[in-house]
Image (tube, rainbow, N blue to C red):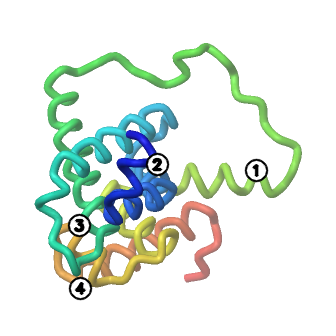
Amino acid sequence: MSDSQLNGDPARQDIVRLIPALRAFARTFCRNPSDADDLVQETLMKALANLDKFERGTRLKSWLFTIMRNTFYTRSKILGREAPGIEENVSGDTPIAASQEMAARAREVQRALQKLPPHYREVLTLVAILGESYEATAVICDCAVGTVKSRLNRARHQILQELGEETG
């Protein structure tokens, strides 16, 4: 897409500005960065193809996150039927542990996040990491606000428990 095409449509410019948030949200679904980028790309293609269906005055970010979520779950159903082989460590590279405490802690948190059920992980990412409101998250996840609050609370407790920081 050329700059002249983007300059002509504010919604397209807004979509481009939201790509970092889309990448962050995609990482809640995909462990592999390449798969996350593919999910972002597919989301962007669908959004641009259906931009005429976006209701002006509503949150573009929520609309894009909903497209991404639906795309991921549709893909998952298809892949589940195809049953591909295990993808872990395809390159054969053995990860090397960093000596820095912060890097190690970040990996611990990432592992704890990956152990969460997907519906907890996506709510935690939307609210705690990306700063979405409970209401916007409820729309994106197609559930009630109370369900969002409950999933967020359970996700936080599971993360703390996994990290050995829950006191009771």
The quadrant the C terminus occupies is bottom right
Q: CA distance from mark 3 to mark 2?
A: 16 Å
Residue 14 lies, with reference to residue 86, above or below; the image says below
Asked if the residues shown at circle 3 and circle 4 are in contact, with their CB atoms under 8 angstroms apart, the answer is: no
The total number of labels drawn is: 4
User: SS for tag 4?
Assistant: helix
Q: Residue at x 22, y 80 (%)?
A: 57
User: SS for tag 3?
Assistant: helix
**Residue to which mark 3 is pinned:** 141
**Residue to which mark 1 is pinned:** 104
Q: Nearer the viewer, residue 105 or 35?
A: 35
Asked if the residues shown at circle 3 and circle 2 are in contact, with their CB atoms under 8 angstroms apart, the answer is: no
> Amino acid type of disc 4?
Gly
Residue depth check, mark 3 versus mark 1: number of the one nearer the observer: 3
> Amino acid type of disc 1?
Ala
Q: Identify the disc placed on residue 27.
A: 2
